[in-house]
Image: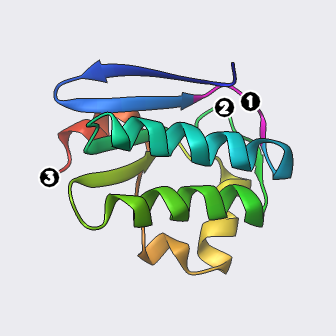
Amino acid sequence: MSFESKSESGHTIVSIDETRLDASLSEPLRIYLFDEIDNGSDNLVIDLSQVRFMDSSGLGALVAGLKKMGGAGSMKLAGAQPAVMDLFSLTSMDKLFTILPTVAEAIEEK
């Protein structure tokens, strides 16, 4: 599986163990996030530290997860690599998501 979750300090950390988050993984990621949310995870931290490339479909899966939360709880992104940060900046999604350098900082951030 390309995704795994663990609980830490009241947060669910979702790790993406792939270097590319593109059309081939966007739907599985969306389903995985929806399942986590449906199962009560309301403080998500998405660990993007392994992802070196993301396209619009990968971004769309993250946006869908955020919308699914409906303002209840939080979804933070952590460890975004330079090319991934460029996508967030280019699309202005860096204003929608809280993006922090590390998972530890995402957990600590209020």
Front tag of 1 and 3: 1
Give the residue type that dot 3 points to.
Answer: Lys
Give the residue type that dot 1 points to.
Answer: Glu
Label 3, residues with CA under 10 Å away: few <14, some 14-19, many ≥20: few
Q: Residue at x 26, y 43 (%)?
A: 43
Mark 2 falls on what kind of element?
Answer: loop
Which residue is identified by label 3? 110
Image quarter where the N terminus lies is top right
Tell me if I can see residue 85 in this picture: no
Front tag of 2 and 1: 1
The x and y percentages for residue 24 are 85, 44
Q: Earlier in the sequence, mark 2 or mark 3?
A: 2
**In this picture, which residue range is highlighted in magenta?**
16-20
Q: Are marks 2 and 3 in contact (CB under 8 Å)?
A: no
Q: Does residue 17 lie above or below 43 as drawn?
A: above
The x and y percentages for residue 86 are 68, 66
> Coloring scheme of the render?
rainbow
Q: CA distance from mark 1 to mark 3?
A: 28 Å
Which residue is identified by label 2? 50
**Left/right of residue 55 with respect to residue 70 in the rendered view:** right
Q: CA distance from mark 2 to mark 1?
A: 6 Å
Circle number at residue 18: 1
**Left/right of residue 13 with respect to residue 9 in the rendered view:** right
Q: Are marks 2 and 1 in contact (CB under 8 Å)?
A: yes
Q: Residue at x 77, y 34 (%)?
A: 19
